Image: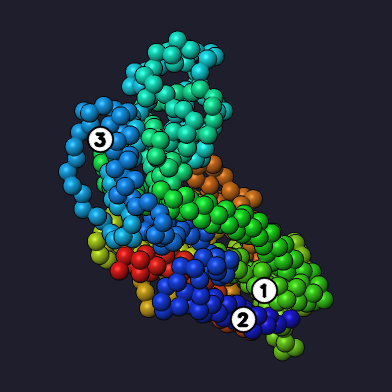
Amino acid sequence: MSLQVSAVEKAGSKTSKAEARVDAIVGEAFDVQKFVENFEVLVAEVGGTRHLKGLVLELAIRGRMSTQRGADESAAVLLARLRSERLAARGSNSKATAPLEPPFSVPPSWAWARLDHLWRSITDGDHQPPPKSERGIPFLTIGNLSRRKLDFTSTRYVPDTYFDSLDELRVPRQGDLLYTVVGSYGIPLVVDTEQPFCVQRHVAILKPLPSTDVAFLRRLMESDFVYQQAQGAATGIAQPTVGLGMLRNFVVPVPPLEEQKRIVARVDQLMARIDDLEARQTKKREVSARFTKASLETLTTAEGPEEFDAAWKRVVENWDTILDEAEKATDLRKAVIEMAVRGHLVPGRPDDGQAPGFVAADEAPYLLPRGWRWGRLETLASHIVDCLHATPRYTSSGLPAIRTADVVPGRMLLDQARTIDEDQFRERIQRLEPKCGDIFYSREGERLGIAACVPAGVRVCLSQRMMQIRPKEPLFSPYIMWAMNSRFVYSQAVHDTGGSTSPHINMKDIRRFLLPVPPVAQQKRIVAKVEHLMKLCDDLEAKMRRAEDRASRLVEAVVREMVA
């Protein structure tokens, strides 16, 4: 039965259509409204809801997500009122601050301010280790805030007497803003409960003034613009810390108070849409992953031509669902290999004859096509050689010593292989000097069970955890190599592995591997078809990764447009 390559090629055109749709939406001139209205298309075609949230906040804090109205009280008037409220709350000893330089342009009715100018106080939790108690008042750490909401599960407690002794400014109240400043710094959230609690000193407490719009400032503190200031202010390596003095001096844009409320309403609406999109996409990915797995498993385990035809028809009819992201190209490669070693990829011919006579085994795990035979690796190979059990002394230049990291199914990654000198090379090839067509196979570690042929025109040797196989004539070495990469052979390898921290296959078990072996003429046709399909998979994966990368590049382009 022959695989219809057109179905694989069909998927390659999907990404170019996606790029065209995105370009049509965004256009040469950036239009916020057009961009917002087409969230669904942008996410569906290029992915990346995580990018959209950041972009919405950037648009919002630059005045691109709201309209300016002449009837609004200006931000300058708002700041003057906040100053009066601040002086009334703190007294007349508020420190003067140096003039600030606006980082980017904002609408004329907006203004710039230090973060400290917008709050009654910016402090943190008590710096003394709190006494422990079996019950009492919850004591929250950054871990209780890490999911951007107050989490009162698994909390510590402090006695009521300790809580009552705390300065009022160090006790969070409903409507305050909390902001993490140590370790996982940069997480803002609004206190939305009347339940009394206190926090560790790793959490800043921002208490509002009467004219402070906490909801707007929470969104502002979520923006990448503010987070970058936190990154620039953080000191320390093990536990980077944003000092309160630095936090108070963050520079922030301030819209008119009424516009702040409109911005919050718009941002909340868009964030809800993004969350809904994200939930739908997650569900779609889960369903798609299950469908892909089931479809490919049905395809690769088909027992006869009719069952295979039905399975392949289902794959072709649902191609866009089965292969909708780059990672699934790996599943397609595995399916191609599995179809190859089961005789589904290339039809046999009357003149193919039989598999070589020395190919014979006493087991038959599944029914093979006419002319095929089961063979154990030890009967298919003239040589099966293990590596030297010693790590080479690598040099800055020389001859490649192939490690497990240097092989992927069907290919050696020679450009990344480490090298050794000529003397070590000769020592490592004493058992068998590799030649073109020999198979290197990883037999230990995380990358166990991967095979690749030695290409023509190179001198290579085995590094640790690798072994070398030389198939007998007239077997076609690349076919044996692809069979070694099949799911069927890998299942034998996994079954026979020993060791937990570094799983490995014993040489005697590798020698007993069962492989399906077709007639030699068919082996060559199978390899030609496999390599053609692998090239299509590589191209398809590259195109899909470019499409997936468009989300981040799109955000960068939009931000550049905004800043220009």
Q: Amino acid at mark 2?
A: Lys
Q: Amino acid at mark 1?
A: Trp
Residue 267, compared with residue 547, is above or below; it is above
Give whichever of 214, 280 is nearer the camera: 214
Give the image location of residue 92, x and y in percent: 22, 28
Determine the CA span between mark 3 and mark 2: 59 Å
Give the residue number, with chain letter if any, for mark 1: 319
Residue 409 visible: no
Residue at horizontal 54 percent and vertical 27 percent from the top: 194
Mark 3 Cα-neighbour bin, 10 Å: few <14, some 14–19, many ≥20: few
Residue at horizontal 49 percent and vertical 30 percent from the top: 174
Viewport quadrant of the N terminus:
bottom right
Q: Earlier in the sequence, mark 3 or mark 2?
A: 2
Give the residue number, with chain letter if any, for mark 3: 245
Give the image location of residue 431, x and y in percent: 42, 61
Asked if marks 3 and 1 touch (Cβ < 8 Å), the reply is no
Q: Amino acid at mark 3?
A: Gly
Give the residue number, with chain letter if any, for mark 2: 10
